[in-house]
Image (tube, rainbow, N blue to C red):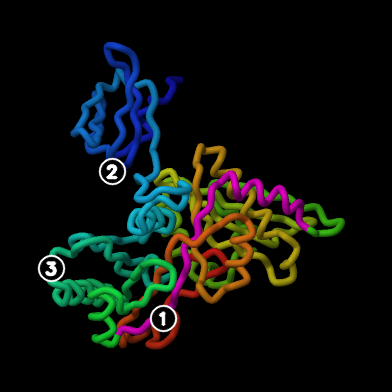
Amino acid sequence: MTSAHPLDRLRVGMRAVVRHRVDDGLTDALGEVVALDDSSVSVATRRGVRVVPRGAVVAAKEVPPAPSRRGAPHLAPSMGDLQRVMVEGWPPTERAALGGWMLRAAGGFTGRANSVLPLGDPGLPLPEAVLAAERWYAERQLRPLFSLFGPEGFAVGDDALGTLLTDRGYTDVNRSVVMTASVEALQSAARTTGPPAAGAAEVTIQAEATPSPAWWAASDERRRGHRGTAEAIMAGSPDQVFLSLALGGPVVATARVAFARAWAGVFGVHVAPGSRRLGLATALVGAAAAQARARGIASTYLQVEATNEAARGLYRRLGCATHHEYVYLAAPEGPAGQQEHRPGQPVQRTSSSGM
């Protein structure tokens, strides 16, 4: 059996650091991987593209987006960069680029996988870009939905796109908060909190690469109702772990952790109603942090509805801080039969950690 080469972990488009031999020792190439083949890797560094022969590489790994501000690493990336990271944690089954906009679709299940993510200039005047996006969703019989992001408490009318959409009759159907933390802080907080207050019942947490029947049975009802689509979405993440917490036998709490772009995303923390207020969510978050740390990942994110103050309070106590917010703006009318997308009704209802 031959051992894996360090470059086998990389792919084009990643931000990575490649350590390699040079005449006077070792050096690093840090930047985006722009080419990769059997003979070399090309990395776009700040000083230009560096081509590194495969035989000279001694180590290589993916690294997080470059910081845009000083401070804790989990708060340092820009809002746009963190949005890009989060896409890979809950990826659509179909995506297309409209200039700097990402158009996402996944059969209408969850707003995150079925909305326009404006990450830059669409390459068209805004009115034309909005019309082009609307046509794209109409072709898929989906109600057009835009995900706008900004600092905590931002107003939809703060920018030209938000103003244009509201003038066209788009309405705010849901607002969510992106919270981040260091993996170390989450682990430490979970340990300090102590084991779940489950009395004499034995608490066990199992981590699996694919969701087991027990995981599905204990998952939230909305995800179970769209199991095929949910499975297709989750299969798009490069790496993930499914956590099942059993309390004296049956599984009563679940979560999913997705790993992409050197970040860990905690998704769908769900505790059965009869087992809440026992510290099980804290135990799951601690287990998620342990999985991230085992992969050498230092920062984690989660998404939670802005109105879910109980969940936000829990995550704050565990060391999470608000990075930014995002809001879904939905078109005034949707195609017939799209029950999840009725005008004036929430397009996405998240669990305690978003979805």
**Residue 141, image quadrant:** bottom left
C-alpha span from label 3 to label 2: 25 Å
User: Who's the residue at 28% across and 43% down the image?
Assistant: 13
Q: Residues within 10 Å of mark 2 (few under 14, many from 20)?
A: few
Closer to us: 247 or 44: 44
- Above or below, comparing residue 271 to residue 256 in the picture: below
- Does the magenta run of residues contain 180? yes
Does 353 sit left or right of 65 as displayed?
right
- Circle nearer the N terminus (2, 1): 2
Assess whether mark 1 and mark 2 are in contact (beta carbons under 8 angstroms).
no
Label 1 sits on residue:
173
Farthest-out residue, right: 200
- Above or below, comparing residue 47 to residue 132 in the picture: above
Give me the disc on residue 145: none
Mark 2: amino acid: Gly
Visible residue check, residue 347: yes
Magenta segment range? 170-196
Mark 2: which secondary structure? loop
Mark 1: which secondary structure? strand
Mark 3: which secondary structure? loop
Give me the disc on residue 13: 2
Where in the figure is residue 219, as x and y percent of width and height?
Answer: 60, 64
Does 48 sit left or right of 183 as displayed?
left
